[in-house]
Image (spheres, grey):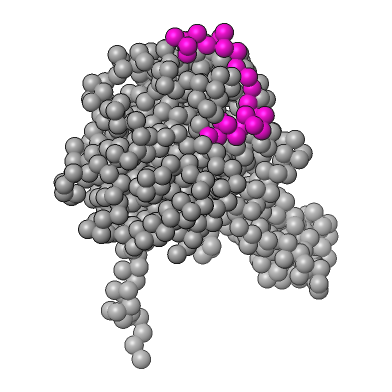
Amino acid sequence: MRTGRSSPGLSLASALVYLFLYAPIAVLVVFSFNQSRLTARWRGFTLLWYTTLWRDHRIFHSLMNSLVVATATTLICVVLGTMASLAWTGVAGKWRSAGEAVVYLPLIIPEIVIAVALVIFFSFIHLELGLTSLILAHVAFCISYVIIVTGARLAATDRSHVEAAMDLGANEWRAFFRVTLPLAAPAILSGALLVFTASFDDYLISSFVAGVGSTTLPLQIYSMLKRGITPEINAVSAAILAATIPLVYIAQRLERGSLSLRRAMASLAGIFAFMAIPVLVRTWPSSPNVPQLNLYVWSDYLSPRLIHGFEQAYHCHINYDYYDSNEALLAKLQAGNVAYDVVTPSDYMVQIMIHQGLLARLDKSKLPNVWAHADPRFLHLPFDPHNDYSVPYAWGTTGLAYRADLVKGKVDSWSVMFNPRYAGHILLLDDMREVFAMALKELGYSLNSTNPAQIREARDLLLREKPLVKGYNSSNFQQDLAAGDAWIVQAYNGNMTFVMHENPNIRYVIPKEGCTISVDCACIPRNAPHKKLALEFINWFYRPRVAALFINDCGFNTPNLLAPRYVRPWLLRNTAVFPNPASLTRCQFMHSLGRAMLLYDRYWTEIKAD
């Protein structure tokens, strides 16, 4: 029997596994140095995205939040988890089984269930959402790691060592610090690293329990992904990777016993200091006593220049957080324990929030710029006929984007989405209302239909189309189009702005049958703590140059009639941002569908599950 030599087949299999695991990471790091905004093509080496990252206050602020939350969570979990492990060491029988079941529950229960339960609980105890709620939530689902890992180590420890120390005159505290703690230290440190990683990386629970100014790095990165995977995101990921590799190395050496606990702790402290010092430099508050304004907006709806401009003009500080769906915004406001001053819900959600009493009535006399510069098409709409609770903030359409070099012939109709010629190259939004709107428009019906027969007909059409569909994607569909993985996509117009500028083969059209036209509105929540400053922000946003800054930086259009005077020429020529007015005649706003939503929900489940 051969020893000391591995089989060539096993070596090849191992190499393929490592290649599968680490090749995507290598590609990510390489493309963080790509000159192009699109990861689909290489245009040369640059450090631009790392310098952009250094100037991006949003990234450093969210990184600081993540470090604070993860560090606090780790310390609390280590102390409480170690104490719990010691307490359960001497317990046996049914009580131990019950305790183990309680410990394992947070790891077994779906995160979405934990997130909803925590939001309800924090609302019940009137705890305002913010860093405190984040830390408590993370402790709730992370403490099990410490209890399990440390408990296993303590259970395997020979109790006679402690008894011998006590026989030699040590009391319980001295025996703990001199014997038990050193024996359990590697497990405690391993558990701490697990907790820190899980807390730092969490997205789902954090998205529910985060409040004013508590956006973490995963939430920030996810919001940036709405604009596609850019080299700046790759640069962030590469920086995090560079910081985590030493942590893994230290943990492995400690586990093997080749590194003392004291040196491991010193090394970890050095790594955390190396991570924290640049963050502190970039986020150190310059004026802690200035007025605050708290914004909760769509991920694409702010730019650093816009924020800085208002802060300079009104000598205040803006805290901003992002949401990725109207439903997430609604859930936060319904909980009643958030302190946001300005929110930007979509048209149909404004109607729901007004009905539920979640919005404050606007003092129209404080908004002269709105009434002077707003496009009348977006005022006095059915969801808020007198603009008592909302004013238009941004507007757009949901149409067709395609690759002109891959799709031959004229593209001006939703019917192209049902053409078998493009099977496997069609991408739809992962949005029930938008997908049904497409099908209803193709059939010649209103996209707000509540007729059961029409809705069923749209479902049947979508089921017949499904074999042609590559997937459902509402986040980075523009990247798939740019890479050629998809040829035709259902797209939000604003997401196509910059990708069309990068690739002239990408086109955006409003189908001749019509499509969704939407307007997102600036509103002030009923419980907003800074209503006066919120009104100042909305009125300032309606200055033509400010509205143009929003278009130039974010790629979405505003209802400001004078803003185009200051918009970049290439954006004015972009049909996704500035469509031909004649093409909007058959477009419709979405309305609340009442009980018909139950039917849409059921059919959407059938489509996605089929």
Work out whether 578 lies above or below 207.
Answer: above
Q: Nearer the viewer, residue 530 or 53?
A: 530
Magenta residues (range): 348-372
Q: From the image, give the main secondary structure of the stretch colored magenta.
A: helix
* Furthest residue in direction bottom, as rendered: 1
Residue at image location 31% in from the left, 17% down from the top: 564
Q: Nearer the viewer, residue 127 or 23?
A: 127
Q: Nearer the viewer, residue 463 or 111?
A: 463
Does 402 sit left or right of 372 as displayed?
Answer: left
Q: Quadrant of residue 479?
A: top left
Q: Quadrant of the N terminus?
A: bottom left
Is residue 151 in view? Answer: yes
- Residue 112: x %, y % from top left: 60, 52
Q: Quadrant of residue 161?
A: bottom right
Residue at image location 38% in from the left, 13% down from the top: 544
- Residue 243: x %, y % from top left: 44, 45
Is residue 324 in view? Answer: no
Q: Quadrant of the C terminus?
A: bottom left
- Residue 102: x %, y % from top left: 73, 61
Does 3 sit left or right of 283 as displayed?
Answer: left
Residue at image location 42% in from the left, 59% down from the top: 460
Work out whether 93 lies above or below 378.
Answer: below
